[in-house]
Amino acid sequence: MKKSLGAKTLLYPTPVLIVGTYDGEGKANMATVAWGGISCSSPPCVSISLRGATYSFHSIMEREAFTVNIPSEKFAKEVDYVGMASGKNVDKFEVTGLTPVKSDLVDAPYVEEFPLILECKLVHKLELGIHTQFTGEILDVKAVEDVLGERDNPNMEKLQPLVYETGFGTYYGIGERVGKAYQIGKEIGD
Amino acid sequence: MKKSLGAKTLLYPTPVLIVGTYDGEGKANMATVAWGGISCSSPPCVSISLRGATYSFHSIMEREAFTVNIPSEKFAKEVDYVGMASGKNVDKFEVTGLTPVKSDLVDAPYVEEFPLILECKLVHKLELGIHTQFTGEILDVKAVEDVLGERDNPNMEKLQPLVYETGFGTYYGIGERVGKAYQIGKEIGD
């Protein structure tokens, strides 16, 4: 028997993504986003949602580009600060000591210190209510060598990304390896 | 210095979602989906992406409804099987022994054994390429009492959801609590 919790955004878990943008004057900014995910395999696309009141919203509308940066666990404090402050009032790169790097591919900056970054060109926007969903085509993914495993795939245990608990607003790390996809299910059938 | 990995869907981590649907004849089906996330806070919306070749794709087109079910770690084998088999050929509920429950709110079934479920009415579809993104308004969330913490919020440690490593196709559990959002960042500024 299940208990009704009401119409709420209780998806578990959500990712912890840092969205990089330039504003109209070329000032680099970051936003912490838990509302997002991959939306297409080919062309590769990622969707993120932002409120119209945010500074990043207007930057994406203007530049039609953004980066999605995956911070590792050790940057949790910086990530949380970026989620509280507004680029309207402060230079979040300056305050956190993180370094913006201009993408060669899209009109947006990525975060030098973060291990994995996706460079995205805006292909669709969708106003859903308080949030607008921006879908970007992923033109390239870049990673530091330290986090790569076989066949240059990022390894979850080396990368140590954060996950977000939506109900209480808590950050968690990644736990134990549970099993290989397209393999452990064969015990049930194929 | 970062290494270019090419235009790929390497977002870390992605969630492990089981999408519940009815087909045209009312047969209940499930699909395992890692491409998705929350897309709006108000109205609360969740977006998931499916290939046009899947059985669930056609069911959502027809019924304009779906559920998003969060399995706990102990169901990893069932989850993986559901991601390999097609509802075209088999009854995945029958094979896995999981139980479909008809939602009172939307024209879709949820999974009785899974601890957290979202009942969604289709509000938007977007063809992005090989995948079509379906956005559903969350009409209700239901959970088993065991996974609830204070103020009836699902607790990550009790829920034990899975996360997916996109590069290698591996399931992971949730790790250690890292810190509280809107709090740990205050050390840097506010």
Image: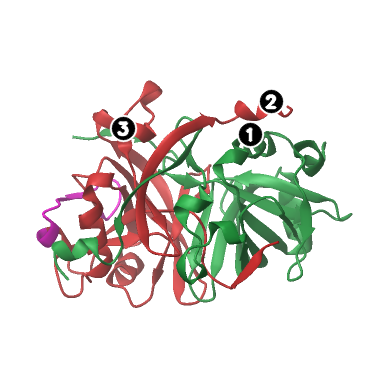
Chain colours: A green, B red
> Which mark, residue A105?
none
**Chain letter of the residue carrying label 3:** B
Specify the amino acid type for callout 2: Glu
Dots 1, 2 in contact, CB < 8 A: yes
Relative side of B181 to A106, left or right? left
Specify the amino acid type for callout 1: Lys
Is B100 within the magenta?
A: yes
The span shown in magenta is B94-108
- Disc tally is 3
Q: Give the quarter of the figure containing the N terminus of chain B.
A: bottom right
Specify the amino acid type for callout 3: Lys
Q: Position of residue B23 (x, y in %)?
A: 23, 67
Asked if residue B111 shows in the view, the reply is: yes
Q: Which residue is mark 2?
A: B187
Is B170 within the magenta?
A: no
Q: Give the quarter of the figure containing the C terminus of chain B.
A: top right
Q: Position of residue A90 (x, y in %)?
A: 82, 37
Q: Which residue is mark 1?
A: A77
Do the residues at pointers 1 and 2 share their chain? no
Quarter of the view holding residue B66: bottom left
**Chain letter of the residue carrying label 2:** B
Which of pointers 3 and 2 lies earlier in the amino acid sequence?
3
> What's the distance in space between the residues labelled 3 and 2, CA to CA?
29 Å
Dominant secondary structure of the residues highlighted in magenta in the image: loop
Q: Which residue is mark 3?
A: B158
